[in-house]
Amino acid sequence: MYVILVYDVGEKRVGKMLKLCRRYLHWIQNSVFEGEITPVKLKELLASAKKIMDMECDSIIVFKSREEKWLDKEVVGKERNELGNFL
Amino acid sequence: MYVILVYDVGEKRVGKMLKLCRRYLHWIQNSVFEGEITPVKLKELLASAKKIMDMECDSIIVFKSREEKWLDKEVVGKERNELGNFL
């Protein structure tokens, strides 16, 4: 399935979360990722994320769509993902 | 149509952007909004956003779906939107 994942975590945990999410999805903006992922891999990702998160103040939202084609994407301003390859 | 909007703007512009987006959509996380919006209203929102943004470093990504039911949403950790009513 196709997912959009957005996280909001404390500054101290941003680096770890970024690294984790990039193992599974494409980084498209600051704290936003997208990509094809299996339900099993998504569970694995979220289980690892929970270990990083402070559940009192951090959050992750995952939007799931069976097919990417059901979603149109419009970007305004600077596209970030070209940075992704250098980090 | 149903949209998810995510912005990444410099700290100085966050307040203005938040205020603008909340006029059109529901705030669900730090810089993430969702909701039903007409194409005309979305154009209006993005035109106003462009006036706030520094196009060299800021960005907005809008995911559009014809129907909300095509998207499932899963939240891990703290849900932020209950704050929305108090701000």
Image (tube, coloured by chain):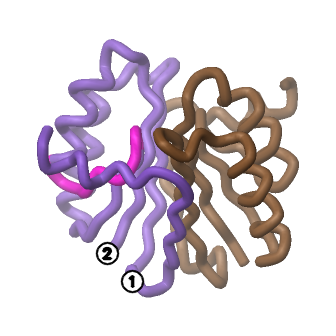
Chain colours: A brown, B purple
Q: Is residue B35 visible?
A: yes
| Residue B8 drawn above or below residue A23 | above
User: Which percent across, then down, holds residue B81?
Assistant: 30, 53
Position of B14 with respect to B16 (left or right) is right
Chain letter of disc 2 in the image? B
Amino acid on which the number 1 mark rests in the picture: Glu
Amino acid on which the number 2 mark rests in the picture: Met
- Which residue occupies 48% across, 61% down? B63
| Residue B17 drawn above or below residue A41 | above
Q: Which mark is residue B1?
A: 2
| Residue B18 drawn above or below residue A23 | above
Range drawn in magenta: B23-31
> Callout 2: helix, strand or loop?
loop
**First along the sequence among labels 2 and 1:** 2
Position of A2 with respect to A44 (left or right) is left
User: Which percent across, then down, holds residue B21?
Assistant: 24, 44
Q: Is residue A76 visible?
A: no
Q: Which mark is residue B67?
A: 1
